[in-house]
Image (tube, rainbow, N blue to C red):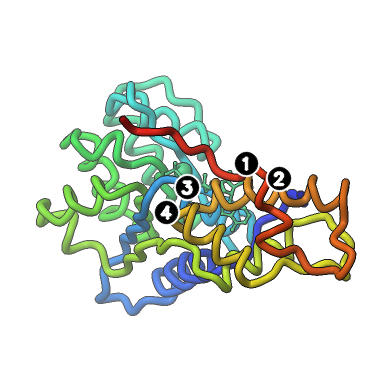
Amino acid sequence: MRNKIVDVKNVSAAMALLENLLTRSQIVPGMGLIHGESGFGKTTALQYLFNLDTTNGVYVRCCASDTPTSILNRIAKECGLVSTGRAYQTLDSIIECVRRNEFSLFVDEADYVVGSKKIMESFRDIYDNTEQPVVLVGMEEIARRISHRKQLHNRISEWVEFKPADLQDVATFAYELMEIDEHIQLDDAVLDHIRVKSRGVVRTILSALSKIERSVNGNPPPDGVVTMDDISSLDLFMTVARN
Ligand SMILES: Nc1ncnc2c1ncn2[C@@H]1O[C@H](COP(=O)(O)OP(=O)(O)OP(=O)(O)O)[C@@H](O)[C@H]1O
Ligand SMILES: [Mg+2]
């Protein structure tokens, strides 16, 4: 399998979100939210955004053990600052740096910290004092909890819910990532089987495609089309019997 980021619909939606935040009018608030189930490709889309030449950003990933101090120290480090002072001093340095460099801040796995009022207020402080885009990323918990927090909720002007991959996305992943003879194609029934069984989770789709890739390279279909029959003996999805 090729190691690259495929520009599927969710990735384009994330790009549009950042673009809209960067070009918003002055009276529109500038926080963004990307949410969706595990494995739908949120972190990968952020990496893609983050690596664009046009993006001037800071990426931090929250952890279960984060405290207000640890998260501020991580942001400071990503900003290239040495944080030696107290939390409020670190916050001031971050604000100054984000404002000066016009950084966008991406906060991944924000579910871990959404329960901490202090941490969420730090993100809000960074936004209020810089007016640079702050994009929070996480699963359902983040969307639900933020909707209950008026002060954060009304600063969010752009939000995207990542959707399960559809048939076209599965076909794009297969075409862009599988290292197989270019004349070999996967039958639509196979692509749809992968879509249904994976429930649109990219992580699961890629592991199924990688198994098919290995099988096809060892034993190519004579007519150039991989059908359901060809994959019937492959164990593509981990299924656990529930008793
Ligand atoms: N657009 C893409 N192009 C190529 N690979 C992708 C893409 N999106 C996701 N993947 C692959 O699928 C895997 C899962 O994606 P990712 O980790 O981004 O999901 P996530 O939504 O952040 O999940 P979690 O909520 O568990 O953190 C990644 O390891 C990556 O290899
Ligand atoms: Mg992730």
The residue positioned 10% from the left and 56% from the top of the image is 150
- Going by the numbered disc 3, the residue's amino acid type is Gly
| Residue 8, numbered circle | none
State which tag comes first along the sequence, 3 or 4.
3
Towards the viewer: 102 or 18: 18
In the image, taking residue 138 as reference, residue 141 lies left or right, namely left
Kindly identify the amino acid type of the residue bearing the numbered disc 1: Asp
Q: Is residue 41 left or right of residue 65?
A: right
Q: Earlier in the sequence, mark 2 or mark 1?
A: 2
Dot 4 falls on a residue whose secondary structure is helix
* Mark 3 to mark 4 CA distance (whole Å): 33 Å
Q: Which marked residue is nearer to the observer: mark 1 or mark 3?
A: 1
Choose the circle earlier in sequence order: 1 or 3.
3
The residue at which mark 4 appears reads as: 99
Disc 2 element:
helix
- Mark found first going from the N terminus, 2 or 4: 4
Residue 18 image point, x, y percent: 45, 66
Secondary structure beneath label 3? loop
Q: Which residue is mark 3?
A: 39
Residue 184 quadrant? bottom right
Instruction: Classify 10 Å Cα crowding around label 3: few (below 14), some (14-19), many (20 and above).
Output: some
The CA distance from mark 2 to mark 1 is 8 Å
Q: Is residue 26 above or below residue 96?
A: below
